[in-house]
Image: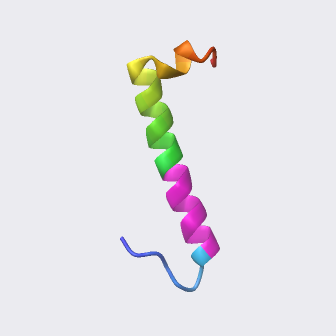
C-alpha cells in the first residue's frame, strides 16, 4: 500500500504505529517484553 502523498506525515505515522504494534504483539508472544521487565 502506497502512502498518500497528500498526507505524508499521517501516512508515515500510521505505518510506524502498525509496525510498532506488530513488533509489540510479537514481543509479547515470544516473551521478549517480559524479559525486559515491561508489563
- Residue in view at x 63 percent, y 19 percent: 38
Residue 19: horizontal and vertical position, in percent? 47, 49
Q: Position of residue 15 (x, y in %)?
A: 50, 60
> In this view, which residue lies farthest toward the front?
36
Side of 6 where 18 appears, left or right: left
The one of 37 and 22 positioned closer to us in this rendering: 37
The residue stretch that appears in magenta: 9-18
Residue 31 is drawn in which quadrant? top left
What residue lies at 63% left-to-right and 14% top-to-bottom? 37
Of the pair 34 and 11, the residue shown nearer to us = 34
Residue 18 point in image, percent of width and height: 49, 51
Main SS class of the magenta portion in the image: helix
Q: Position of residue 35 (x, y in %)?
A: 54, 14
Q: Residue furthest left?
A: 1
Q: What is the quadrant of the N terminus in the image? A: bottom left
What count of labels does the image hold?
Answer: 0
Quarter holding the C terminus?
Answer: top right
Above or below, comparing residue 23 to residue 1 in the picture? above
Q: Residue at x 44, y 41 (%)?
A: 22
Residue 12 is a magenta residue: yes
Relative placement, left or right, of 6 versus 26 is right
Q: Is residue 1 part of the magenta span, yes or no?
A: no
Amino acid at each position: 500500500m502506497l502512502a498518500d502523498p497528500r498526507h505524508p506525515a499521517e501516512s508515515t505515522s500510521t505505518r510506524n504505529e502498525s509496525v510498532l504494534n506488530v513488533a509489540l504483539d510479537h514481543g509479547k508472544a515470544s516473551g521478549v517484553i517480559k524479559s525486559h521487565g515491561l508489563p
